[in-house]
């Protein structure tokens, strides 16, 4: 940017950059609907990266595949609309945008 434009901007009091004075929590653009306080801090299924030979799932900030563990649950299947988790003899289907069970 030329010095002339900078001088004019300074004389007019135009701020080119503004920074927030306090940190703010941003909303996750991949999670739809209202987010309850009870889900804050819980791992959620953000999305599925579908590939017929090697599907992946995004859980929280991690990318997982079949056989990986998430919060004590083993990923046993990745579908186009969610994942199947297993803990002992219990299996749970988790749809995209849903929190991983904590118990």
Image (cartoon, rainbow, N blue to C red):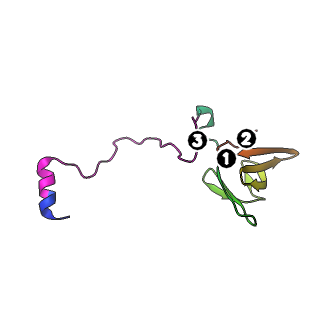
SS class of the residue under badge 3?
A: loop
What residue sits right under mark 3 in the picture? 32
In front: mark 2 or mark 3? Answer: 3
- Label 2 Cα neighbours within 10 Å, binned few <14 / some 14-19 / many ≥20: some
Q: Contact (CB < 8 A) between labels 1 and 2?
A: no
Residue 69 image offset from top left, x and y in percent: 74, 54
Q: Along the horizontal axis of the image, is 15 left or right of 4? A: right
Q: Earlier in the sequence, mark 1 or mark 2?
A: 1
Q: Earlier in the sequence, mark 3 or mark 1?
A: 3
Is the C terminus in the top left, top right, bottom left or bottom right quadrant?
top right
**Inter-mark Cα distance, 3 to 1:** 9 Å
Q: Contact (CB < 8 A) between labels 2 and 3?
A: no
SS class of the residue under badge 1?
A: loop
What residue sits right under mark 1 in the picture? 96
In the picture, the disc for residue 66 is none
Residue 51 image offset from top left, x and y in percent: 71, 63
Q: Along the horizontal axis of the image, is 29 left or right of 64? A: left
Of residues 71 and 4, which is closer to you in this image? 4
- Label 1 Cα neighbours within 10 Å, binned few <14 / some 14-19 / many ≥20: many
Range covered by the magenta-colored residues: 7-35
What residue sits right under mark 2 in the picture? 101
**Most frequent secondary structure within the magenta stretch:** loop
Residue 28 image offset from top left, x and y in percent: 53, 45
Residue 45 image offset from top left, x and y in percent: 66, 48
Q: Earlier in the sequence, mark 2 or mark 3?
A: 3
In front: mark 1 or mark 2? Answer: 1
Residue with the most extreme right position: 89
């Amino acid at each position: 940017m030329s010095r002339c434009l900078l001088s004019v901007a300074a004389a007019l009091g135009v701020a080119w950059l503004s920074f927030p004075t306090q940190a703010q929590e941003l909303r996750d653009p991949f999670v739809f609907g209202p987010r309850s306080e009870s889900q804050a801090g819980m791992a959620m299924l953000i999305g599925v990266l579908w590939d017929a030979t090697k599907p992946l799932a995004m859980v929280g900030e991690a990318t997982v595949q079949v056989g990986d563990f998430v919060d004590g649950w083993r990923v046993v299947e990745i579908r186009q609309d969610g994942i199947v988790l297993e803990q002992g003899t219990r299996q749970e289907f988790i749809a995209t945008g849903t929190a991983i069970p904590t118990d």
